[in-house]
Image (cartoon, rainbow, N blue to C red):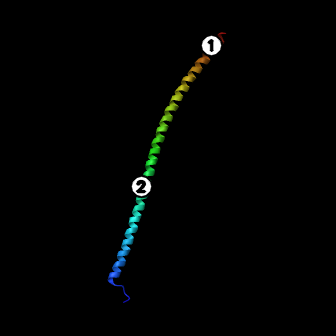
């Protein structure tokens, strides 16, 4: 009997279906691992973005403070120069 029996054919189809199922499960697990890795990377990037935003805000505040100090200093130097000019003019 060279032809396979119905039972053998059914067994082969079942084995092929199981192999396909196992491959699908494996692919799903791989996809889940990749998704988890991307979620972790996304979280790291969000935390980094938040930290950088805080640093930027602090830097902007410092720049504003320094700009105000520069402005005050410039006014004082200008006033001092005027006082010197007046003193030299009266001498």
Residue depicted at x 57% and y 20%: 76
For residue 88, what is the image quadrant? Answer: top right
Residue closer to the observer: 8 or 56: 8
Residue depicted at x 45% and y 48%: 44
For this orientation, the residue located farthest to the right is 91
Q: Is residue 66 above or below residue 53?
A: above
Disc 2 is placed on an element classified as helix
Residue depicted at x 45% and y 42%: 50
Circle 1 packing at 10 Å, graded few (<14), some (14-19), many (20+), is few
- Mark on residue 86? 1
Residue 83 x, y percent position in the rendering: 61, 15
Q: Disc count in the image?
A: 2
Q: Is residue 8 above or below residue 19?
A: below
Residue depicted at x 37% and y 75%: 15
Q: Is residue 86 above or below residue 32?
A: above
Q: Nearer the viewer, mark 2 or mark 1?
A: 2
Cα gap from disc 2 to disc 1, whole angstroms: 74 Å
Quadrant of the rendering where the N terminus is positioned: bottom left
- Mark on residue 44? none
Residue linked to disc 2: 36
For this orientation, the residue located farthest to the left is 7
Disc 1 is placed on an element classified as helix
Q: Is residue 86 left or right of residue 41?
A: right
Quadrant of the rendering where the C terminus is positioned: top right
Circle 2 packing at 10 Å, graded few (<14), some (14-19), many (20+), is few
Residue 69 x, y percent position in the rendering: 54, 26
Q: Which of pointers 2 and 1 lies earlier in the amino acid sequence?
A: 2
Residue 85 x, y percent position in the rendering: 64, 15
Whether pointer 2 and pointer 1 mark residues with C-beta atoms closer than 8 Å, the reply is: no
């Amino acid at each position: 009997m060279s032809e396979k029996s119905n039972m053998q054919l059914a067994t082969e189809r079942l084995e092929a279906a199981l192999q396909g199922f196992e491959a699908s499960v494996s692919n799903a697990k791989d996809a889940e691992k990749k998704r988890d890795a991307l979620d972790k990377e996304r979280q790291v990037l969000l935390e980094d973005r938040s930290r950088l935003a805080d640093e930027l805000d602090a830097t902007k505040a410092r720049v504003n403070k320094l700009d105000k100090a520069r402005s005050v200093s410039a006014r004082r130097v200008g006033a001092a120069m005027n006082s010197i000019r007046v003193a030299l003019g009266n001498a």
